[in-house]
Image (cartoon, helix red, strand yellow):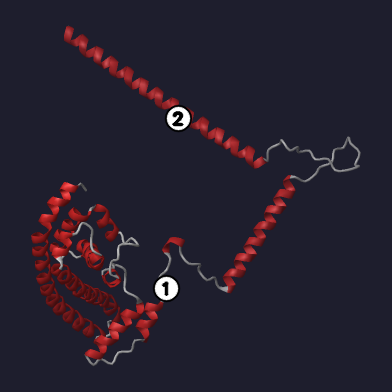
């Protein structure tokens, strides 16, 4: 960024940044009240599911409750950071680089702005910081580089990954205790402790019963014996009457093909001949139809001339 751009942006940062931060703080307070009511309603629904014995639905709904609680906690931290930056906007405006004591707050606001769709004012603040400090500063905070100094709690609370199993069970127990429900968490703990199946590695091996296994083994042995006998019969030595029986002489050399291969070749050649005959017959029929059409056209032309 050039010196002229920094001079112009330095004068524009103060009023716009104060306005956007003030709007963001007021919006966060309204959203916190709204999310608090939604969380209470969702917890009441989960309590009803636990009371009705529908634990599978409760296990799914509790993830939404945990996500709402995490967002609510992240908004609390963002509200403190916005108030902290708002009180020190003149310092940001007077210095070329971001001050060290404000770096965590500024980086956390930059990181949270695209992840909090309910707070569009933070996007405007992020754009103002980008105009003052450059795109590299914004990229460092957005990509969580080592020198970004984004608040770790905000990173965890705004994460889109599924909550851990122990957190789910803890929240379910809190809901059951809050609404005085005698709920046994053994089944849920067993279900959540199961590891998900790896579908990329294919289906699991099917357990074979002992009788079926013995049948399969006997079938495999018999097939192997049959193949060995067939090979021995195909390549068995024969004796000639003219030569003395000093040792066995093989009538088949290594270049001679087996009978099965010869039969397959003959079948393939016969199939090819049959397809060729069919193609020739189809061509004859097509040429005959063409000749008939030509004769019909000539006949019509002669009639018109007459």
Crowding near pointer 2: few (<14 within 10 Å), some, many (20+)? few
Please give left or right for residue 305 compared with residue 229 in the image.
Answer: left
Q: As rendered, which of 237 and 37 lies closer to the eye?
A: 37
As drawn, the label of residue 195 is 1
Q: Earlier in the sequence, mark 1 or mark 2?
A: 1
- Secondary structure at numbered mark 1: loop
Residue 263's place in the image compared with 47, above or below, is above
Would residue 78 appear left or right of 196 to someone viewing this image? left
In the displayed structure, 91 sits above or below 258; it is below
> Residue at image x 37%, y 78%?
192
**Residue 119 in sight here:** no
Residue 179 relative to residue 163: left or right:
left
Q: Secondary structure at mark 2?
A: helix
Answer above or below: position of 183 versus 116.
Answer: below
Query: Residue 267: image x %, image y %?
Result: 57, 37
Outermost residue on the front side: it is 94
Q: Give the Cα separation between the discs numbered 1 and 2.
A: 61 Å
Please tell me the numbered disc located at residue 278. 2
Which quarter of the picture shows residue 122?
A: bottom left
Label 2 near label 1: C-beta < 8 Å? no
Residue 252 shows in the view: yes
Q: Residue at x 36, y 23 (%)?
A: 286
Which residue is painted at 29% across and 86% down in the image?
173
The residue drawn where x is 24% and y is 52% is 135
Q: Position of residue 248 (x, y in %)?
A: 85, 43
In the rendered view, would you say 305 is above or below 297? above
User: In the image, residue 234 lies at what x, y percent?
Assistant: 72, 45
Choose mark 1 or mark 2, whichever is in front.
1
């Amino acid at each position: 960024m050039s010196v002229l751009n920094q001079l112009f942006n330095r004068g524009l940062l103060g009023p716009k940044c104060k306005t956007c931060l003030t709007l963001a703080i007021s919006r966060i307070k309204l959203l916190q009240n709204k999310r608090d009511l939604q969380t209470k309603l969702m917890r009441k629904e989960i309590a009803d599911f636990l009371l009705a014995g529908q634990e599978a639905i409760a296990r799914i709904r509790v993830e939404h409750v945990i996500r709402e609680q995490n967002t609510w906690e992240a908004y609390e931290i963002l509200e403190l950071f916005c108030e902290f930056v708002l009180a020190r906007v003149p310092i940001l405006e007077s210095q070329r680089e971001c001050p060290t004591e404000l770096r965590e707050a500024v980086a956390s606001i930059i990181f949270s702005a695209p992840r909090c769709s309910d707070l569009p004012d933070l996007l405007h603040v992020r754009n103002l910081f980008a105009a003052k400090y450059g795109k590299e500063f914004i990229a460092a905070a957005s990509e969580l580089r080592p020198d970004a100094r984004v608040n770790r709690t905000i990173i965890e609370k705004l994460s889109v990954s599924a909550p851990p199993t122990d957190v789910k069970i803890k929240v379910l127990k809190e809901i059951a205790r809050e609404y005085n429900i005698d709920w046994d968490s053994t089944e849920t703990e067993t279900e959540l402790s199961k590891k998900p199946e790896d579908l990329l590695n294919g289906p699991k091996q099917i357990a074979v019963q002992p009788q079926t296994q013995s049948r399969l083994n006997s079938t495999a042995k018999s097939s192997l014996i049959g193949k060995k006998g067939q090979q021995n019969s195909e390549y068995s030595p024969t004796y000639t009457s003219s030569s003395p029986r000093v040792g066995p002489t093989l009538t088949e050399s290594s270049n001679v093909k087996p009978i099965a291969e010869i039969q397959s070749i003959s079948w393939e050649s016969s199939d090819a001949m049959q397809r060729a005959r069919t193609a020739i017959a189809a061509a004859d029929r097509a040429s005959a139809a063409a000749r008939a059409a030509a004769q019909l056209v000539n006949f019509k032309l002669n009639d018109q001339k007459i």
